[in-house]
Every structure is written in C-alpha cells, then in structure tokens.
C-alpha cells in the first residue's frame, strides 16, 4: 500500500511541476525569447494545438483520439515488458521501468488534461532546428529511454551469458 501511495504522490508531484512550468511560461514569456544557449536553446511561449511537432494542428478528433491510442500502446508495452522482466527475475530492471511508468503517466496526464481544458498544450523549450516542447514531453521521453535502456541491458546481459556458456563448452 505504501508503494502505491508513493507512486501516486510521485505522479502528482511530477504533474504539478509540469503544470507549474507551463504556468510560468504563460505568465512570463509572452512574445519574448529568452536565450539559454544562444539561439540554439531558448525559452519561448508557443501553444501547440496539434500533436508532436504540431502535426494535425486544429484537428480536434485526431488530437483527442491519437494520444489515447498512443498511451494505450505504451501502457501495453510497459505491461508486456514488465511481465517479461518479472519472469526473468530482473528486479532492478522492473524498478527502472516502474519509475519510468510514473514519468509516462505524469507526462501523459499533463499534456492531455491541458489539451482537453485549453484546446492546446503550452510548449516553451525551443531547440533550434528541432522542436518546441515542455516538461511533460521530457517525462514521456524519460520513460522511453528507461524502457529501452532496461531492455538493452538485458540483451547485453544475455549476450554475455551466452558467450560465457559457449566458452565453457
């Protein structure tokens, strides 16, 4: 029970940080651009009415349904890989993807709730030649990196074990 309460509080804390940074961007950036690393990395206020990279901007049906479908796919991947890792007794990898799932949930809630309430998502971290994004987007990316990292570690471990078995024959 303590773990689930901690997990929920963690997700709520992450959501709070995401919403607070969006509020700061809304309240203080306006039309200004604040350079962090010259023109390469800046803070600037943008409302994205689309999905990633502003795709499907203004299309309410797509921007309402696609995040739900995408989340469902990511949740299924999480469940599949968690069960796979539990079956293999990979406790550390399970902890890693459980942590990642809190980031995934917070990022998804953060952007989806804002999209439903305000019709778009506040983005404010601008990387020249790439995209403008927000903290919730970073959370979703953290989940993906942790999941891929855990799976790569398992693959590397398997490869090492197979090589050792081969050498012992």
Image (spheres, helix red, strand yellow):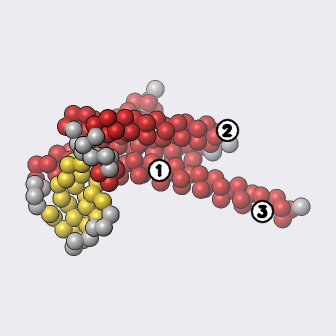
CA neighbours of label 2 inside 10 A, class few (<14), some (14 to 19), many (20+): few
> Circle 1 is placed at which residue position?
144
How far apart are the two marked residues, 1 and 2, measured between alpha carbons? 21 Å
Given residues 147 and 30, the one toward you in this image is: 30
Q: Which residue is the extreme one toward the right?
A: 169
Q: What element carries label 3?
A: helix
> Circle 2 is placed at which residue position?
87
**Residue 110 appearing in the image:** no
CA neighbours of label 1 inside 10 A, class few (<14), some (14 to 19), many (20+): some
> Circle 3 is placed at which residue position?
163
Name the residue rendered at 34%, 38% in the picture: 62
Name the residue rendered at 64%, 53% in the picture: 154
On the image, the x and y values in percent for residue 100 come to 45, 45
Given residues 4 and 101, the one toward you in this image is: 101
On the image, the x and y values in percent for residue 114 come to 24, 38
**Residue 33 appearing in the image:** yes
Name the residue rendered at 49%, 39% in the picture: 73
- In the visual, does 157 lie left or right of 73? right
Q: Earlier in the sequence, mark 1 or mark 2?
A: 2
Name the residue rendered at 24%, 48% in the picture: 48
């Amino acid at each position: 029970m303590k773990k689930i309460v901690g997990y929920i509080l963690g997700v709520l804390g992450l959501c709070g940080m995401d919403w607070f940074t969006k509020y700061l961007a809304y309240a203080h950036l306006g039309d200004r651009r604040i350079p962090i690393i010259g023109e390469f990395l800046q803070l600037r206020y943008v409302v994205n009415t689309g999905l990633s990279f502003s795709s499907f901007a203004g299309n309410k049906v797509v921007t309402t349904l696609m995040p739900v479908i995408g989340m469902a796919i990511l949740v299924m991947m999480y469940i599949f890989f968690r069960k796979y890792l539990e079956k293999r007794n990979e406790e550390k990898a399970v902890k890693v993807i459980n942590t990642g799932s809190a980031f995934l949930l917070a990022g998804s809630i953060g952007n989806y709730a804002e999209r439903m309430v305000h019709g778009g998502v506040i983005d404010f971290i601008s990387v020249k030649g790439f995209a403008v994004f927000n903290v919730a987007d970073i959370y979703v990316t953290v989940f993906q990196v942790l999941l891929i990292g855990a799976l790569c570690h398992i693959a590397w471990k398997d490869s090492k074990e197979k090589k050792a078995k081969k050498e012992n024959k």
